[in-house]
Image (cartoon, rainbow, N blue to C red):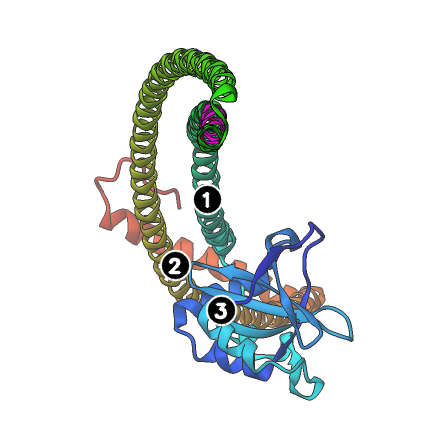
Amino acid sequence: MSAPLERDAPGPEISLRFITRDAEKLFNALAPDDQRRVARAIAQPPPRNRCELVTALAKERVFHFAVGESLRISFCQHPEGGNCIIHIGTHAEFDRFAKHYAGCNSTNVILLAESSIMAKTDTRPAAYGQQAVLEKIGEMFQLLGDGMREVIKETRDGLRSEIQSELLEPTRESLRKLERTVEDLTKKTSNEVAQIRGDSYKEVSQVAQRIDEAEKLCRDLASQTRNLQICLGQLEEGSKNALEKACNEIMDQMAHTAADLRGQMEAGLARLSDQHEAHRRKAEDQWQATSGRLEAAESRLHEAAQQSQQAECRLQAIESRLGAVDQHLAQVTVAAEAQRDALEKWQAHVTAQQAKLEDTLVSLVRQVSQVGESLAEARSRQAQSAADLAEQARLVAQLIAARNRSWGYRLRAWWDGIRRKVLGAWRGPAAQQSAPCSSNPKKP
């Protein structure tokens, strides 16, 4: 079953909040690439004017939008607000699903945020916005493919409608006019021939009727003559002459009447022959004119057929060009898919390298924190040692000051000075003897 579709009115963006468990199972059964495409489409659904309305199923308005070239996501309105995804798959799978669809059951519905679709969706932000860039590139390629398909379809339909409106429709209208003209001429000619034949037949029948009347009159006169001859044999000789005279007069009258009737009949036949000849010539002239019109119509039909063939050739050329454009679009789509797959692979590699870099940075941060803790501890120990040394110096200074103030220290210092002087005086001559060549001898 193929459900008929109709374009819905433009509206705001749709909000997908719920999903059935059956649709979740269908999503888990898809290939990994299809799962990523479906997850991206669900995360960023299209506006409502790009969704198509399916015929009412189980008293619900069911919509769907395409994901790639083969998949589509079908959803309906949920009583709690938002939309619920009821099917994810191909067109044929949805047709089979629609045969047994009985409505959205609330016990079979879960939140989309709690489903495995959102769990499998990578929500971690990529470095420097690479994920967003790749998604935008994929959306741009998809929109570009859809737009080019719509442009090619509209161009093809427009060219076909333009060819039909500019070439085929006028040609067909001319053919219809020519056919109507030929039919009218044929009917008119047949009517005129029938009328001529009817008039000729009518005149011939009138002449035949008059001939029949004359023959009947002659038969009546002949019967009367026989009766008179019979009567003449019975009458006397005197009345026989009178009767013969009357009979001769009657015979003369009959001959005159017959001659008049013969002249009228010959005149009528001549007039009828002239009329028939005139009608025949007129019919021949009309037939020749009709033949000329038919030849002109045939030539126009031939020209119209040639124009139709030229239009068909142009249409075939346009269709071949459109086919080439379709092939180029398919190649562009394949190249875009390959580029998108390459970008996805590159994104996966970049994501892996980023994860490794993040792990390395985490380890470095830990090491730096440990080194900082060690430095802080060493600084604290150094400060403690400096404080201890300062305390010891203070104590030594206090001791030195106290010793300087004591008399014993002063006496000892006086004694040490005297001893140094005595020893210097005793060591002076020995130093002079040991260094006689010295240029600067020390004074005793």
Q: CA distance from mark 1 to mark 2?
A: 19 Å
Q: Nearer the viewer, residue 402 or 243?
A: 243
State which mark lies toward you, 1 or 2.
Answer: 1
Kind of residue sitting beneath label 2: Glu
Q: Is residue 359 among what the camera can see?
A: no
Kind of residue sitting beneath label 3: Val
Q: CA distance from mark 3 to mark 1?
A: 55 Å
State which mark lies toward you, 3 or 1.
Answer: 1
Left/right placement of residue 393 relative to residue 221 reads: right
Is residue 207 a member of the stretch shown in magenta? yes
Rendered location of residue 252, percent (x, y): 46, 13
Say whether marks 3 and 1 touch (CB < 8 Å): no
- Looking at marks 3 and 2 on the same chain, the residue that comes earlier in the sequence is marked by 2
Which label is found at residue 181? none
Residue at 43% x, 13% y: name it.
259
Q: Secondary structure at mark 3?
A: helix
Q: Nearer the viewer, residue 349 or 385?
A: 349
Q: Quadrant of residue 305?
A: top left
Q: Is residue 206 above or below residue 9?
A: above
Residue at 49% x, 26% y: name it.
236
Which label is found at residue 344? 2
| Residue furthest right in the image | 80
Rendered location of residue 220, percent (x, y): 49, 31
